[in-house]
Amino acid sequence: MRPSFADEILNLLAEFSIRPLSVEEVREIQTALGMVAAGAGLCIVPASSQRQRPDDVFYRMIEDKQATSPVIMSYRRADANGRINDVKELIHEMYADRPAWLQLSEL
């Protein structure tokens, strides 16, 4: 499905005139991290993924304000009732003050 996380990353790299010689796009983050652990290269994943393979993969933060990934909430159009609005409001409240549980570990 497009646009994808891979598209976001490739667009970010292109903005800095970085053009990888080879790109392998996988559907699962765990697969990408497994490829890195096997020595097949590197991958760019959301920061929250660092907890998935803490022992055999090194993580480095990309320190750039443009290096963000959108978070998307999907729901069926037929279900667009009051409950969806309640969920959206709850999510907004949960993330409004950037709570400590949202911060990344120091792996």
Image (cartoon, grey):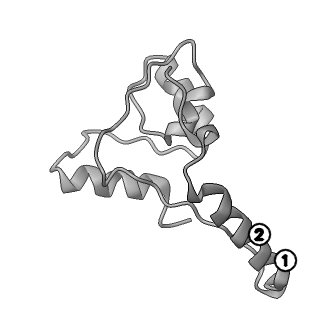
Residue bearing the label numbered 2: 87
Quadrant of the rendered structure where residue 20 is?
top left
Q: In which quarter of the image is the N terminus?
A: bottom right
Disc 2 residue type (three-letter): Val
- In x, y percent, where is residue 68? 41, 53
Q: Distance between the residues labelled 1 and 2?
A: 6 Å
Q: What element carries label 1?
A: helix
Q: Is residue 84 above or below residue 97?
A: below
Q: Is mark 2 on a helix, strand or loop?
A: helix
User: Neighbour class for label 2 at 10 Å: few (<14), some, many (≥20)?
Assistant: few
- In x, y percent, where is residue 82? 83, 83
Labelled pair 1, 2 in contact (Cβ < 8 Å): yes
User: Neighbour class for label 1 at 10 Å: few (<14), some, many (≥20)?
Assistant: few
Identify the residue at horizontal 20%, vertical 56% (top origin). Answer: 15
Disc 1 residue type (three-letter): Arg
Identify the residue at horizontal 47%, vertical 66% (top origin). Answer: 3
Numbered badge on residue 83: 1
- In x, y percent, where is residue 66? 31, 55
Describe residue 21's horizontal placement relative to residue 48 as left or right. left
- In x, y percent, where is residue 65? 30, 51
In-front residue for pair 82/43: 82
